[in-house]
Image (spheres, grey):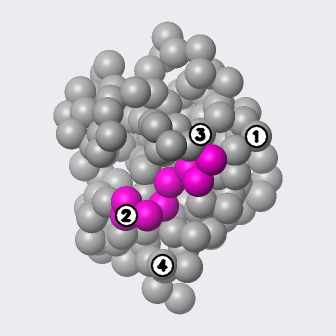
Amino acid sequence: PRPVATAPANGFGDKIAWRGLAEGFSEAAAQGKPIMMVVHASWCPRCKALQPSFFDQSLVDVSDRFVMINIDQDVEPAVLRHGPDGQYIPRVLFFDPAGALDPTILNPTRTRFKYFYNPPDDLVGAMRRALDRHART
């Protein structure tokens, strides 16, 4: 069965089983799944531009192999510690099941703000790279 969201989608795809910060890291460790974390803010126009990407069926399908964490950094400022190259938004980070950031999974089209994705950047490709490195099949 497809997992059910326990955290709000905040406009980032209502078919994705979103988790909060602490719950997501705990679930990843227990299930041995990698984490995809989306950090955003409700007022951010670039965050809103990224939202439709999370309704794409190919992204939804691959999301089931991750623990998907969706955090508004204004609501949960503890997420600010997850800004390896700054606290800009949106940023999309990938972690191994133990909760360690994988600094090699980033947007290859960017030299600054390496965890910034903007449509049509290849989020699904980044997810597949993370699965190749961290999924336990």
Q: Residue furthest right?
A: 57
Q: Is residue 40 magenta?
A: no
Q: Is residue 95 visible?
A: no
Among numbered discs 3 and 4, the one appearing first in the sequence: 3
Image: 30 above or below 41: below
Check contact, mark 2 vs mark 1: CB within 8 A. no
- Mark 3 to mark 1 CA distance (whole Å): 8 Å
- Mark 2 to mark 1 CA distance (whole Å): 22 Å
What residue is disc 2 on?
102
Among numbered discs 3 and 2, the one appearing first in the sequence: 2
Q: Amino acid at mark 3?
A: Tyr
Q: Main secondary structure of the magenta part?
A: loop
- Mark 3 to mark 4 CA distance (whole Å): 20 Å
Q: Is residue 6 or residue 65 the one in the foreground?
A: 65
Range shown magenta: 102-109
Count of marks overlaid on the render = 4
For label 3, the SS is: loop
Q: Residue furthest top?
A: 43
Q: Is residue 133 or residue 10 the one in the foreground?
A: 133
What residue is disc 3 on?
117
What residue is disc 4 on?
133
In the rendered view, does 51 fall on the left or right side of 135?
right
Q: Is residue 8 or residue 119 the one in the foreground?
A: 119
In the rendered view, does 130 fall on the left or right side of 84?
right
Q: Amino acid at mark 4?
A: Arg
Point 51% across, 43% down: residue: 111
Check contact, mark 4 vs mark 2: CB within 8 A. yes
Percent of width and height locating residue 16: 60, 49
**Residue 53's quadrant in the figure?**
top right
